[in-house]
Amino acid sequence: MPRATCVLLLMLMSLAVLSEAATVIAAGTKTVAACGAAVKPAAQILDHLPYPADWKVVVVCNENTWDLLMRQKGVNFISDYGFTFRPNHVTFIRAKVFLEQMQYTPEQVLKHELGHIACSCDDEKVAWSWTAYPSEALGKLGTSDVRRATGITAAHSGSSNSKVAGY
């Protein structure tokens, strides 16, 4: 992960909201309250999804910060919604997804990113398969059960060397 992003995350750890599944962090804002319209719903969605307990979900509250992340060395894609960096156990989601009507809902984005985490791959088809399941079903089944239900096999695992997935 680029150094600037790591520094940004360390500075923002004090802006964290704990959900049962993952830690939600507000980035690009001075207070969590200033980004509450995105942070609170993110935590509520994550409470129903089987994200690993040690995972961090960073809600990028500021468009300038999002643009900075998209320009980081090593980021070879542009995402309008979110992306996951598996080695550091972190998913970034753009606050704009919560604030404006876009093609995909925040829940779809977080399910999609969870698909990348579960398969340990960048396979978009596999990640998209996670969006078809109701959140309640994903939460009750757990990651390994859903992996079996969606047909994720060892062949999908590690199908890319980039370790960064997003859309």
Image (cartoon, rainbow, N blue to C red):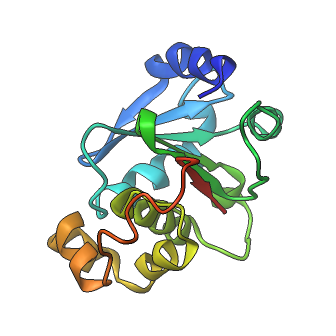
What residue lies at 47% left-to-right and 52% top-to-bottom? Answer: 42
- The location of residue 92, given as percent across then percent down, is 57, 44
The image position of residue 155, as x and y in percent, is 36, 72
In the picture, which quadrant includes the C terminus?
A: bottom right
Q: Is residue 119 above or below residue 62?
A: below
State which quadrant residue 165 falls in: bottom right
- The N terminus, quarter of image: top right
The residue closer to the viewer here, 87 or 138, is 87
Q: Which residue: 31% across, 54% down? A: 51
Q: Residue 16 at x, y = what percent?
A: 43, 28
Q: Along the horizontal axis of the image, is 131 left or right of 140? A: right
| Residue 123 visible to the viewer | yes
161 over 70 or under it: above or below:
below
In the picture, measured across the screen, residue 99 lies left or right of residue 152, that is: right
Instruction: Classify 126 as above or below 4.
Output: below
The image quarter in which residue 150 lies: bottom left
